[in-house]
Image (spheres, grey):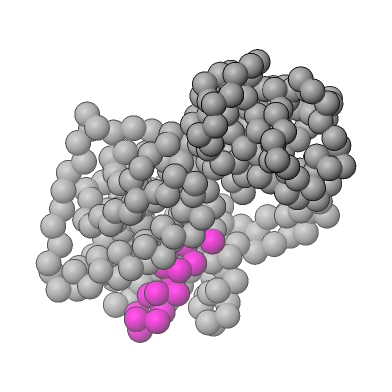
Amino acid sequence: MRIVFMGTPDFAVPCLQALLDKGHDVCAVYTQPDKPVGRKQILTPPPVKTLALEHGIPVYQPTTFRDEETVKTLSSLQPELIAVVAYGKLLPKSVLDIPPYGCINVHGSLLPKYRGAAPIQWAVLNGDKVTGVTTMYMGEGLDTGDMLDKAETSIDPDETSGELFDRLSLLGAQLLLQTVDALQKGDVHRTVQDEALATHTKKIDKSLCPIDWNGTAQHIHDQVRGLSPWPTATTTFRGKTLKIHKTARCGEAFSGTAGTILVQNGRYFVLCGEGALELLEVQYAGSKRMSAGDFFRGHPVTPGETLEASV
C-alpha cells in the first residue's frame, strides 16, 4: 500500500520500520521540525526523520497544515493511507480527506481511556495493572475517532514508563501491520468510542516531580516509576535536590515520621505516610546516577535524618 507516515519520537520508529519491512511503499514521512537538544542546544532531527533518511524516504517538516500549499503538496503524493504515530499535531479535515483508506492512528492506551498526551506515563503514575495500544480512524477531535484494533498487555508492578514505552512501541508496530492488512482486505470493524468512559491526560512536566513522603508507599513508588526516565521524581536531602530513579516496595514493618531514612544491613529505607520504600538508585543534581548504597556511603545518614519535599 502507498502510505504517508507521520510520526516524531522513538515510539513511532518501530511502526515505520515495520511498514518498510513488510514491503509497503512509504512514499513520504512527515515529522516535527528539528529541535535544539542538550546543554549545547545542538539542532537534532527527530528519530523518525533519521530512520526515513536512512531509507531514502523524502521528509517533510511543516509547522502547520493550515496553509493551502502544504495540503496541496501532501495531496500530490497520492497516498492511499496516512499512518500517524505520535506525530504531535492535529490534522485538519483537508488532510483527513486526502487518502481513500483514511488516516489511522496508533495510540498508546486502551481508548477511550487516556486520550491526549503522555498516556503511557499516566498509566504507570496511576498504578494501572493493564494497558495497551489502539488503532483508530482519525477525526477532527483529539483521539476521538472510531477504534479499529486493540492489543492489551499487563504492566509489571516495578516497570517504569520508559520500559513500558519500549514494549508498547513494538506492540503498536504489530498492531499497525494487522490493521493495515485488514484495511487492504476490506475486513475492518469500527467501534465507536464510549464518551462516558473517556478520560484525558495532560503533558508530563516537572511540577509532578516533588515527592510528598506523607503519601502511601505504593503511590510514591508509582510516581518514581511513572517519571522514569524523565523528568524523574525528586526530594530534598541536606538542602539539595536528590533525584530518586528507582525504588522497591518492602514488606518490613516500620514506624516513625514520614521521610525518615532508616539504614538496615546496608539497605536504605524511607518511611512514608503508609508503609516504606527502599531506595535503590539516586542522584544529586549535577552528579552521576548511582546505587543508594554508594551514595549514602559518601553521605552517611545520621539517626533520624529525613528527606524533605523538594520545591
Query: Residue 126 placed where, x, y %?
Result: 43, 34
Nearer-the-camera pick, 147 or 292: 292
Q: Is residue 122 visible?
A: no
Quarter of the image for the C terminus: give it: top right
Does residue 181 sit above or below 264 in this rendering?
A: below
Query: Residue 156 placed where, x, y %?
Result: 42, 49
**Quarter occupied by residue 305:** top right
- Magenta stretch: residue 16 in it? yes
Residue at the farthest front position: 265
Does residue 79 sit above or below 282 in this rendering?
A: below
Nearer-the-camera pick, 21 or 224: 224
Magenta stretch: dominant secondary structure:
helix
Q: Horizontal placement of 184 versus 226: left or right?
A: left
Residue at image location 71% in from the left, 27% down from the top = 261
Query: Residue 302 placed where, x, y %?
Result: 83, 26
Residue at image location 65% in from the left, 15% down from the top = 257
Nearer-the-camera pick, 190 or 131: 131
Residue at image location 33% in from the left, 54% down from the top = 153
Q: Give the range drawn in magenta.
A: 10-24
Does residue 188 sit above or below 2 in this rendering?
A: above
- Magenta stretch: residue 14 in it? yes
Query: Residue 93 placed where, x, y %?
Result: 32, 49
Q: Horizontal placement of 95 versus 221: left or right?
A: left
Does residue 27 sit above or below 306 in this rendering?
A: below
Residue at the farthest right position: 298
Nearer-the-camera pick, 169 or 250: 250
Quarter of the image for the N terminus: give it: bottom left
